[in-house]
Amino acid sequence: MRVLCVDPDTDAGRATGAAIRDAGIDATVCGTLREAREALDDTVDGVVTEYDLPDGTGLELVDAARDVVPDATCVLFTDAVFDDLDTAALGTTVVEYVDKGSPDAHDELVDLLTFSIDNRSQTAYPLPPNEEARLDAIERYVSDPDALDASLERLTTVAAALFDVEAATVGFIEARQERFVACHGTDVDSLDREDTVCTYAILDDGVMVIPDTHDDPRFDTNDALDDAEIRFYAGAPLRTDEGEAIGVFCLFDPEPRTFDAADRELLSTLADEVMANLELRRRLRAATGEGDE
C-alpha cells in the first residue's frame, strides 16, 4: 500500500509519514499541492492532506486524486474545523476527516487508512489491474466520441432486434463515468461509474450476464438501475489487441431473462464489430494525422 501525505509543515509531515510507515504502509511526503500532483499516480491507495497548502487546498488535491485513482481513501488531516471548510465543490465526493490536534491523531489516522484501504472494494467500484493503460487506450481509440454515433447506432438497433430486448448500448468506461456513444431504446449520455453494471463487465474475460439484477448482491440496492428499470443485463467487453477493456456492448431489459451460450457468442461478435470499427478509425488517424470525421 502507498499513501501520499501532504503537509506544508515539514516536521508535521515527517511525523505523519513516520506514523504511516510504522504501520507497514509506504508513505510519500510532500509539502505543496504542486508536489503532490506530480507524485499522484495509480499506485496511490490513499491521500492524507492538510487543508491549507501554500498553493491551494487539500480539497483540490482530493478532487485531482479522484480523477487518477477513483477508489483511493482520502483524508483531511488538519487542525481546521471541518464545518468551517469550503466543501461545496466536492459535491458527493467522499472525504474522511481526522482532527490533527487530537491526542491520538496519528493512531486514529492509521486505523482509518488501514481499514478503508483494506475494505475499499466493498465501498467503491472495482478497478482492473491495468486501469492506467486502459484509460490511455480510450484516448487512442476514442478521440472524438461524437463522431462514432451513426455507425454504432446501427449496431445497437440490430442488437435490440436480434435479442428482443428493450435497449442496447455502446459505452466507454472512463475514469469516473461511463460515456454512452450509441443507444437504442434508451436516451442516456453518461452514468457515474459506481452506478453502472458495465464497470464490472470490463473485469470479465467473456460476456457478463445478470439474469436478474435483484438477485445479485452487487446491484440489488442500486437505485440507478431501478430508476432505469433494468432487471436483465448482458455485456461484452470491447477489448483492444493488447487486452485493455475500454468499454462494453451491453443489452438490458425490464424483465429478468436467460441468455444462452449462442447468445453470448453473438453478443461477442457484435462487440468485435465495434472494435474493428474503432481500430480502422485509429489506423486512419495515424496515417493521416487527422481526427475522426
Image: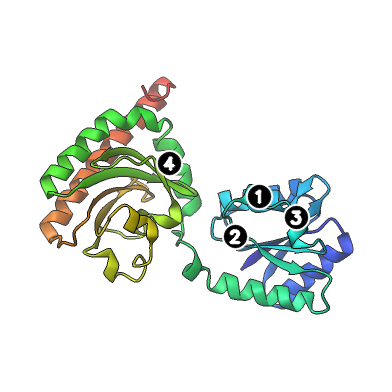
Residue 169 image-quadrant placement: top left
The answer to whether marks 2 and 4 mark residues whose Cβ atoms lie closer than 8 Å is: no
The answer to whether marks 3 and 1 mark residues whose Cβ atoms lie closer than 8 Å is: no
For label 2, the SS is loop
Please state if 27 lies on the left or on the right of 131 as rendered.
Answer: right
Which residue was labeled with disc 3?
85
Mark 3 vs mark 2: which is more N-terminal? 3
Q: Is residue 278 above or below residue 64?
A: above
Quarter holding the C terminus is: top left
Which residue was labeled with disc 4?
138
For label 4, the SS is helix
How far apart are labels 3 and 2 at the CA level? 14 Å
| Amino acid at pointer 3 | Leu
Mark 1 vs mark 4: which is more N-terminal? 1
Mark 3 vs mark 4: which is more N-terminal? 3
| Amino acid at pointer 2 | Val
Residue 7 image-quadrant placement: bottom right
The crowd level at tag 4 (other Cα within 10 Å; few <14, some 14-19, many 20+) is some
Please state if 102 lies on the left or on the right of 64 as rendered.
Answer: right
Residue drawn 82% across the image and 75% down it: 102
